[in-house]
Amino acid sequence: MKTQRVYCEPFCIEKSHLFEIHKVSYQSTDPYSCFMHFHEVHEFILFESITGQYFYSQGESSLQDNDIVFTPAIETHNFDCADGEKSWFILQFLPTLFEHEDFVQVRGVFNQALHLRLEPEHISVVQQQVAWLHQCYQRDPHSPLSLNLLKTLILWIAEFSHPVDLQGNKPIAKSQGFKKLQPIIDLFRHNPSVELSLEQAAEKCYLSPAYFSRLFKSVFRCNYSQYSLKHRLYSAARMISQSEKSITEISYELHFSSPSHFIAQFKKQFSVTPKKYRSEVFSKSG
């Protein structure tokens, strides 16, 4: 299996595109990391081979081969994947797609994050559909065939999958810890860079720094400073792929101490320099 260096984020839908779909593959020795994040598009991940956990608004659930997860725009979520080979298709699309009359009957199904499992007889059908969609997308993402396959795939998932039983897990978004952190969570959601110290962030939430630190790590599974840095780096990746701003401009706009510091941190996170990342994005869209 050939390794394709793709990340759970950041994917950015090309301007004028309604959706994007990518194949993601990791060898057993390839490093993989994700963090609690959100994006401005709806997202399906259709797993082929996977062992791990999905953390989302409804709680935590165990992933297995051929599972599907749906995460709506601006919903916080994360994946913790076990070592070993893993692969999936990631399908992201604009929320406006659900305004189409074809989705009137299923809009209510996808109004929250879902961990879905197909009936056995439909696994191969969905696998074939997503392979066709990926192939058509690579040829012409705007073609009627691509758009019809996209609609068919989503409607098929809505009809022939069922939510995985969470066995009494308490939804994260309804937990007291999540609610107490809501002020700082909203800042991250609406700003590419949050320049607050731990003490300032704790004050925003009316919590002591020590309690805020423990609570933040229990909800986001990393400490506040780590999350803040990763948030800036993922924001940088979006800006690199969606704007013509120079690497220097982006580094200062996101409050890195210098362009060289930004480049080093970006490469450490994504295993590629910002310049190389931009060239890969442009070559993909070209």
Image: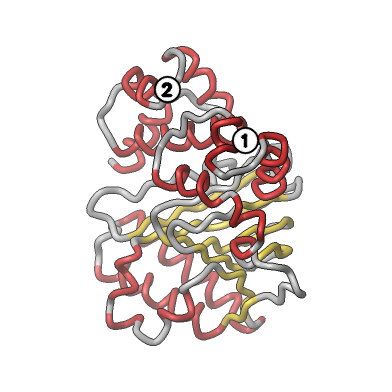
Q: Residue at x 45, y 59 (%)?
A: 91
The reply to whether dot 2 and dot 1 touch (C-beta < 8 Å) is no
- Visible in this render: residue 83? yes
Identify residue for label 1. 224
- Visible in this render: residue 237? no
Q: Residue at x 52, y 44 (%)?
A: 184
- Please state the horizontal and vertical placement of residue 52, each as a whole percent of the image: 73, 56
Whether residue 250 sits left or right of residue 10 in the image: it is left
Q: Compared with residue 109, is residue 202 higher up or lower down, i.e. above or below?
A: above
Q: Secondary structure at mark 1?
A: helix
The quarter of the rendered structure image containing the C terminus is top left
Q: Residue at x 55, y 84 (%)?
A: 160
Whether residue 224 sits left or right of residue 248 in the image: it is right
Q: Earlier in the sequence, mark 2 or mark 1?
A: 1
| Badge 2 amino acid | His
- Please state the horizontal and vertical placement of residue 110, each as a whole percent of the image: 47, 74
Q: Compared with residue 277, is residue 191 higher up or lower down, i.e. above or below?
A: below
**Dot 1 alpha-carbon crowd within 10 angstroms: few under 14, some 14 to 19, many 20 or more:** some
Identify residue for label 2. 255
Q: Residue at x 65, y 66 (%)?
A: 171
